[in-house]
Image (cartoon, rainbow, N blue to C red):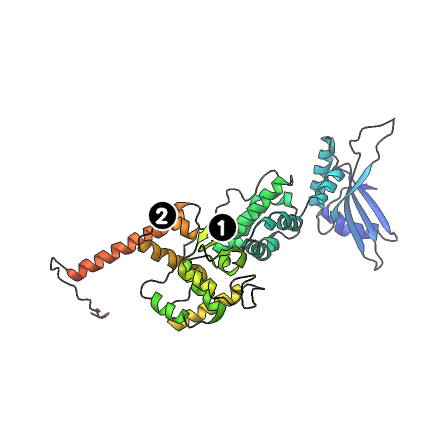
Amino acid sequence: MADFISEDFVKNRVPKLMRGKDALKVRDSKLTGFMLRCRRTADDSITREFLVEYLPPLKVKDGEKPKRKWLSIGKSPTFTADEAREQARQMLQAVKNGDDPAAIRAAKKAQPTIEQLWELFDEQHLAMKSGETPKDYRGRYRRIIEPSFRGRRVADITRAEVDALRVKFKHKKTDCNRALAVLSKMMSFAMLQGWRTDNPCSKVPRFTETPNDTWLDEQALPPFIVALGKVDGPMGDLLRFVAVSGWRISAARLLRWDQVSLQRLEVHLDDKATKIHATALSTDAAMLIDNQPHRMGYVFSNRKGRQPIGYSDVLAALTAVCEEAGVERITPHRLRSTCATHAAVNGANVSELMQTFGWKTPAMAMRYVKRSESLARKGVERTAGIINVFNKPTADVKELSRNG
C-alpha cells in the first residue's frame, strides 16, 4: 500500500485502515524508501513506527546481490511525520553518497559516553595526581559535569552545550570555572584516545573571579593567635603549623613521618604543587611536628597516625577559633595568605616568597609584594598625618541633617 504519509494520515487515517488488521505497512508515495509500520498491541492500541528501506552500497562478491535493509527512524508521536520524512531523506542521501546508515548508527552506538570517559579518565589520569586534586575533580564531575551531560556520547558534545552549562551555573562562578577546567581536561584526554578531534571547551570564556584577599592584619592576628593557643591536641598543632609555615592545608594534613627530617629541618614532599623538592622548616614548625606523640603514618592525626585529620574537622575548629578571637571567619587558605602577606611586609622578596610557599611562577609572589607596598604606602601616609610637619588644618566630620 502506498500513500502520502502526513501527520493527518498517521493520526486519523491509520485507525480506519487498521480495522480488522493486526499489522499494516504503508509506503510513502513521494519519497521512495520512506515507510510507516503499524501494529496492534495486546491492549488493542496501535503503534506507529517510521522506517526507511534502502539497498546498502556494498560490493557484490561472486555475483551475490546485497540485501535490502530496514532501519527504524522512530515512533510517533516522538517523531512527527515531517521530522521522520526529513530523517529518511538524510539517510537515503547518505546511501547515495556511498555510506550505510545502519553502519553509521552502529558505530555511533559504540562510541563512549561521558560516563565511560570519566571512568577511564579517573583510572588513568587522576591516578597520577596526589593530594586533594582527585577529590576536587570528582566533586566537580559529580555536581556539575555528570548531571549536565548524563548519557551523552563524548563525540556528540558541542560547544553550544558547554556554553549552556556556563549559563546554567552562572550563579556559581568559581565552581563553574573549575568544572569547565575539569571538562576541558577530560576532552583533551578524549582526543588522546581518538574519541574526538577537537575540544568543545576551547576558548569558552570563563567568569571573572574576584580574588579573596582576606587575611589577618596586625590587629586581628594577636587575638587569633591567643584563641588558637587554646586548641589542644593534634588539631591545635595542625592549625598552628599552617599558621606559622603557610603550607597548603592539604599538604599539612597529609604530611607523613617518612617525609620528615627533623635533624635537617626539612621535609621532602611528593605533591606536585611543591615540586618534589626539600621544603625548609622553621624551628617553630619543627617543634610542632616533634610535639606529636607518635612516629609513624600521618604526622597530624587523632588516631596515632593511621588517618589524617579530616578537612571538615579543620574547618569547624578554625571557625571556633575565629569566633573566640572575635575576628571574621577565615578558611585554612587565608592562613596561608596571612603568612605570605606578613612575610612580604617584613621584607621577603619575590624569590624568597616563591621558595617558601612553593609557587612555580612569580605571579603569585608579586601579588603579596604589591600588597606589602600598598600597606607601606598607607603606613607612611598615616605616620605623616600624625606628625603633620606642615601644620595642615584637620577637618571635623559632622553629620548633616536630612531636612537641612
Q: Name the residue under label 1.
A: 273
Q: List the single residue furthest toward the top.
A: 62
Q: Which of 253 and 311 is in front in this view?
A: 253
Please tell me whether residue 302 is drawn above or below residue 23 in the rendered image.
below
Residue at 47%, 62% (x, y): give it: 289
Measured from the top left, where is residue 68 in percent x and y?
Answer: 83, 36
Q: What residue type is labelled 2?
A: Val
Q: In which quarter of the image is residue 34?
A: top right
Q: Which of marks 1 and 2 is nearer the N terminus?
A: 1
Crowding near the residue tagged with mark 1, few <14, some 14–19, many ≥20 C-alpha atoms within 10 Å: some
Give the quarter of the figure containing the C terminus: bottom left
Secondary element type, mark 2: helix
**Residue 276: percent from left, percent from top:** 50, 48
Residue 328 position, x and y percent, is: 39, 67
Query: Is 18 situated above or below 393?
Result: above
Q: Taking 236 as reference, is 270 above or below it?
A: above
Question: In which quadrant of the rendered view does residue 214 lie?
Answer: bottom left
The quadrant in which residue 401 appears is: bottom left
Dot 2 corresponds to which residue? Answer: 350
Residue 217: assigned label: none
**Distance Cα–Cα, label 1 vs label 2:** 18 Å
